[in-house]
Amino acid sequence: MKGNEVIAEAAIRCGCDGYFGYPITPQSEVMETLMLRKPWEETGMVVLQAESEVAAINMVYGAATCGKKVMTSSSSPGVSLKQEGITYLAGAELPCLVVDVVRGGPGLGTIQPAQSDYFQATKGGGHGDYHLIVLAPASVQEMNDFVDLGFELAFKYRNPAMILSDGVIGQMMEKVELSPFKPRWTDEEIEKISGSWALRGKKNREHHIVTSLELDPYGQEKFNRKLQAKYREIEAKEVRYEEIACEDADYLLIAYGSSARICQKTVDLAREQGIKVGIFRPITLYPFPMEALAKWAGRVKGMLSVEMSAGQMVYDVRLAVNGKVKVEHYGRLGGVIHAPEEVLEGFKSAFGL
Amino acid sequence: MSNIQDITKPEHLVYRKTPLLTDNVMHYCPGCTHGVIHKLVGEVIEELDIQDKTIGVSPVGCSVLAYNYLDIDWAQAAHGRAPAVATGISRLHPEKYVFTYQGDGDLASIGCAEIMHACSRGENIVVIFINNAIYGMTGGQMAPTTLLGQVTATTPYGRDPKLNGFPMKITELLAQLDGTCYVTRQSADTPGAVRKAKNAIKKAFQNTRLQKGTSFIEIVGTCNSGWKMTPVDSNTWMRENMFPKYPLGDIKDI
Amino acid sequence: MTEEIIIAGFGGQGVLSMGKILAYSGIMQDQEVSWMPSYGPEMRGGTANVTVIISDERISSPVLQRFDTGIILNQQSLDKFEERIKPGGTLLYDPNGITRPPVRKDINIYRIEGARLAAENGNPKIFNMIIMGGFLKVKPIVKVENVEKGLQKSLPERHHKLIPMNIEAIRIGMEHVETENRL
């Protein structure tokens, strides 16, 4: 199955209650697959094509106030439009899942794969001090796995989660083991999980208000401190990463998503030439695996951040190693996918090999 | 003969505040129409006995804090997006009574797409639209419903169609859409008008019960602060200038 | 075994679906596969290509610079991909519309007149399966029975009646592939 189709199937299987979206290449297969599958007949999941990206994310906001599992998907220009809704979701501490199948920018850009929305995804994206929990799948299998994981983390921390994919992982097909079916949450389960805040009708309790508005700046500062404490907890507990061929490595390629896949071939090519290269793959881009990466700073001669961008994650890599090792960037731009051989050339020239 | 104990006996009660209205002090200016409409919505929810099934969506604008005044569950929406937020809630809570409460800037300007498409889809929601021809909260700027010649902070020489375009009759536009079942324009400037407005609001919530689609109620109201008039003069100005452009009555009732 | 294949031609020639059937066939014999299309405006009447990898091991990069095999169905694609076939690799092409035939001497080159054969059989839709047959003749990486299973898996039930016709097209392709340069 295509990565995008797997997102749709995984949503149905993990008991998602609602999807609201708007067509945009290269991720339209998500909604198309859902409409074809008609999950409203099978599980009761709502699927709705909104009039705009803005409406779609605000439908997600409304649906999320119900304490249910709801999601949307889009691609870069669409995700820019969604930023208003995303900051409201973060500000109102609502759980939801946003899938971004990134394409080349800026502006309308291209429809080909890119990784140039790392800043937008990991540093907030909209206004205010907030973060999304960002998962970066490097295979169609992880497109499946991260839907459930995304919802789990979103509800655990009452925070929007994002799957930051790109046109490679979204459009490619490979073998995938789909998750077993989980039923949608019952009313009793929702009451137990989200009963303290969800909008379910006032009865025998104080009325619930979901809002991100605070007129008093001191009150808003207090709320922001609470948000920050939540992010520190996420940073402590939810870091995920993968180390590939790192044990004997003299150099590390730091890459996520499709670039991490491409780099695996680069590593094979480099090792054929006797250059010991490994890959450090952040799986969570926020929280970024700072400490895990810092441990390699004294053990390798150099790190190359490989991203299909002008260099965005490279800033986090440099922060992590704090000057202890040389960090360079390599990446094609605007929707051009770097081939493994190109990455190898870029790597060699960066470190004078 | 009669003392305070006699006078306040329950059987002598002729009026009470609906318990759906909270005791929070309203932030609205004296003379503002919002307070009356909030009360009407509260009374209707009480009379229909649907407090535990009603979810309100508040806008950005003066009525952003509506959630502090009505004792029901509320979501606060981004500017103009209340119909999309209500769509999300209503689709996932099809058995609930979901309504939005929006002003003219929120609904007819920045939220034009959202209200059009919610009405076009016939979302099973109630929309209460307060039209006072001005942006109240931000300090009296031009709204899409501002009348020609009307002076606002951003039309200091009066609204000029060449510069600012024409006032928008959004309610008539929405009545054209197949998804709306009930579209009406009301006011709240006299006891009779208030009673009519309340009946309209009640009918709209009953339409939700019958799953009839979108019910849309415009209330032509005043903004004496923004208009820079006394409340009494505001009512007169509204009758003389707003009602001819925005005539009261049902536009559609299926 | 790892086979890295590029299939390239015009949109509408069945390039992507041929790749898909090949990938499904690999799955049917328990191999790892990846299918990575070019996508976008070029699909609509322009050039289309897809990278298919079939391997006994976990597949690393789904995106490649160089290929073991190129299945090339128009001039633009030949111009673009001939040089990107690994030395010792394989190029299979349809000469229909080709004005500058392949020139490399360090690869195996095969020719199959898929467009002509499809036209002669009165069914342009079997074009891509004729090409597939030619490919499987020179590189039998998947068994025809697994292609049949793959078709059953990938096609909706209502199209299953078309499977015998497609298998027949593969046989036609196998019979008509010609060797142009053999290392």
Image (tube, coloured by chain):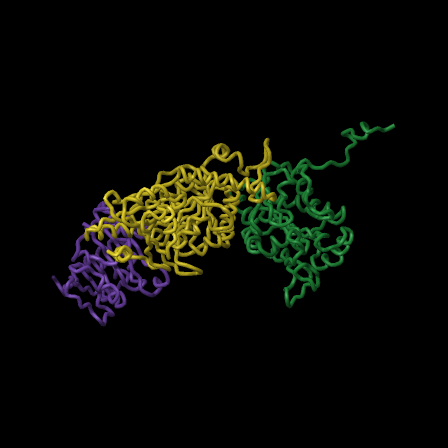
Chain colours: A yellow, B green, C purple
> As rendered, which of A343 and A153 lies closer to the eye?
A343
Q: Is residue C34 visible?
A: no
Residue that sits furthest to the left in the current view? C183
Drawn side of residue A11 relative to residue C10, left or right: right
Q: Is residue C173 above or below residue B202?
A: below
- Residue B101: x percent and y percent? 62, 47
Rendering coords of residue B250 (x, y %): 68, 52
Q: Is residue B135 visible?
A: yes
Farthest-out residue, right: B1
Q: Residue at x 33, y 65 (%)?
A: C46
Q: Tell me what residue is drawn at x 15 percent, y 62 percent.
A: C108
The quarter of the picture where the C terminus of chain A appears is bottom left
Tell me: B178 left or right of C6. Answer: right
Q: Residue furthest bottom?
A: C99
Q: Nearer the viewer, residue B135 or B203?
A: B135
Q: Is C137 drawn above or below residue C75 in the view shown?
A: above
Give x and y (percent) for residue C92: 20, 62
* Residue A114 position by quadrant: bottom left
Looking at the rendered structure, the number of numbered marks drawn on it comes to 0
Q: Please state which of residues B64 and A62 is positioned toward the viewer in this rendering.
A: B64
Residue at horizontal 45 percent and vertical 43 percent from the top = A45
Tell me residue C151's x, y (percent).
27, 51
Relative to residue A344, is residue A13 depicted above or below?
above
